[in-house]
Image: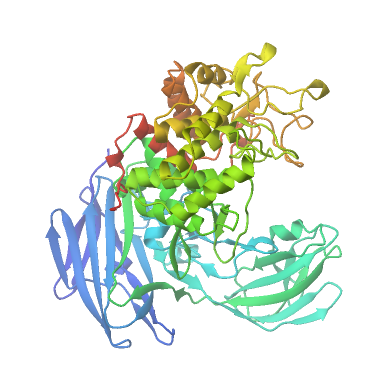
Amino acid sequence: MQKLFSFRLNGDINKGFSTELLYGETLLARHNCGGELNLLLENGDRADRFEIASWKAEEAIEKEGKLILRGKSRLPLYTTDLDIEVTYEQVTDRVIKKTIRLFQNDIPRLYISLKNSLEPSAAPRSYWSFDQKDHTGGPAYGVLTDDVFPAAGFVDESGIMVGLLTDSGWKNKWSRLAWRRTSHGNTATIQITDPALLRTATQEERSEGKHHVTLTLGELYGNVGIPFEIKEQSDRRCTFFGRRGYRYTLAMECRGKKRGGPVNLIDSKGNRIDKINDDNVYSVVTQEWLSFVGRSNELPEDGYYTLFFEESNEIETRNIRIFEASPIPLPWHELRQGKELVRTVLIFAEDSEATARNVKLKSQVNLAEGLGFKGSELEKILYADFKMLTWVTEPGIDEPMVVPSTLYFEMYFRDVFWILNGTQDAFLNENILRRIGETMNEQGSVDNIITAYHGSIEHSDNELPYLYLLWSYLNRKRFGSKPDMKKVHEIATHIRQKFDPDGDGVIKTNNPQSAMDVMLQGRPCRFASSQGYYAVALMAAKELGADISEEYVQAAVDAYRGYYAEYGSEGKFIHSFPDNTLGENGDAIGIVANIDLEPEFLSTYIFERSMLDDEMVINTLEKYPVSPEGLMPNICKVDGTFFSKEVNPFNDDLYWKPGTYANGGSWLRKQYVALAVGKYHGWSKADELMKKRLDAELHFDSENPLSREYLSLSGDRGDSAQHRIFGWNLIVLAIHEWLGIRNPEWNPDLSILND
């Protein structure tokens, strides 16, 4: 039976005040050796370093159900006073919110890292992280580990599951930048920022009775280039002096006619110490130079070490560099003069078995509730996942970045459009749209990607300019924000000149201009989604003030409606790609795709204007096969079958197993949009299928109740997407609000911008 998880004041005016955490009447945990937090501080030129350990408050105030701890620490090394305030708040009977506020007004800048250690009152049964129900110790989330969601905790001696969580990367200023773009390909980062946002006690610490789960904010490992010697030119062996406990990073450019192998790290006796991998090494089959970055583990001893290719296969290298990463972390969060720094921690305790499913489910649900979000279990999961995909762009740049999933390190325009239009956060919607607009080139085309540490120039013929217009209108409608009319006019002109030069409202493109841009063709073709997107983008441009006539908008709408027709024995439906030549003698085969109803959704959702008739929508939806779990393929032949390797519409050599990814996987965002359109148009099956599809996200893969890129229809549930914690499914919240299923005020991010 669940008991109240609560806090109580501990200490006095002489010893200082702190808190204890209780489960029922039983002491469950404390923080930082009986204090509240640890701080590591450096001044602006990093000449002076100071630590505050196990900070306790000078005064304690209980007010309106909250416990507020306050104190002022004199820092003579910096000639400044540091004000610290810690507030505890009971959010639910299972979740406690801890808010830490720091303030100083004497020094231009202090670099700070903060540790919040949750320490069980007795040795726990076990530790856990999001992806490991029995965590062996060390990093539990961050660059140095593979867990996809920042949550870790312990199971106490009576079986209570206790977890430590964090606010979003934007609010708490963290990210997971394990990778970076370069001009020679994607590769690992050299600077290790937020290496282990969460840690559990190591085996050594456990044996010494030092039990903890620790959240560390504002930590990085500095790098310095070191000298090395290339002793053998044949395989480019690089020898350097390494130090015990230090990590080393090899950075270089490489190319070759054959695939390479990993880089070996050996000691002076020839013993292999480590194997350093990088995806680009295995893809070296071209004369184009590719970037390689590989990082070693900590070295066991001082001495000379050598790096070399295990299988060089005639690989050429250039611009070789070796960096040493200090094991002594640096603080990087900035406490500016006269500005408050706020960080939020959440702790939960539940009488629940710490199974692989439960640690994921409870972490997400309790995070959402701790942040004040209300809704169904799945809605809470979608919200929590979105929060954990909202990061700071890079250290020292105070701008947010919203990534598609934890396995990404960059922000994609298409994904972030669907993500942020599922939330009520005006700041994020305004900020991200502005920055995307800043990527616009001279032709009026916006870029697809914003990434840390590097630029990106990716202007393709997809739906991005349409989304810019739609998002500009949505921000005005939802938040009262003012659009950038110069860019609106330029983009509106660009899409008309680019896609409809003859001005009849009918467009042909080389791809469906949607998430199915893997269907790139070598010629302009008719695609239903492209035509629909073009029409709804014109509506947005017209409403924003662009010089576009209603007659022209209607011409584009009529062209979209024209994709619905009688296609012989295949019947009536909206044909996704009528110009395909996949049938016998090069004839077209019937294809239906979820994306073809996205424009209708956007038109009805944004403008309350239906472009399609009920019959068009319902007859098209009836063509899809539906699994017992309520899964519909994102695309398939009109007879309900998938594409073969020999016959498919995908570009280049792209192909996926039938029922997976772009070849018929069930994508929640795409399917749910199509089902919402069906419900709007009175399809009798819509309600049941919408419910079943949401349930499938929680139960189809029983150990992974989380937001997924797609679920498999291959017959093997294990073929579902590796991308877990996927952001754009958050649009489900907006759909529910549109349909009257949920109240927008249940979202704590609800905000309105003033004119």
Q: Which quadrant of the figure has residue 100?
A: bottom left
Q: Is residue 545 left or right of residue 193?
A: left
Query: Depth check: 575 or 177 in front?
Result: 575
User: What residue appears at the point 20 percent right and 73 percent down from the top-left corner?
Assistant: 71
Whether residue 726 is visible, yes or no, is no
Residue at 64% in and 41% down:
501
Residue 321: give x, y in percent of width and height.
69, 76
The answer to whether 459 is drawn above or below residue 453 in the figure is above
The colour scheme is rainbow
Which residue appears at 79% of the width and 62% of the height? 288
Q: x, y (%) of residue 444? A: 57, 53
Direction from residue 21 to residue 130 in the image, left or right: right
Provide residue 554's location: percent of width, then percent of height: 51, 29
Q: Is residue 87 visible?
A: yes
The outermost residue toward the top is: 569
- Residue 351 located left or right of residue 227: left
Q: Is residue 472 left or right of residue 58?
A: right
Residue 171, by quadrant, is: bottom left
Q: Is residue 453 above or below residue 730?
A: below
Q: Residue at x 76, y 65 (%)?
A: 289
Q: How many marks?
A: 0
Image location (x, y in percent) of residue 279: 70, 57
In the picture, which quadrant includes the N terminus? top left
Front in this rendered view, residue 4 or 554: 554
Is 46 above or below relative to 160? below
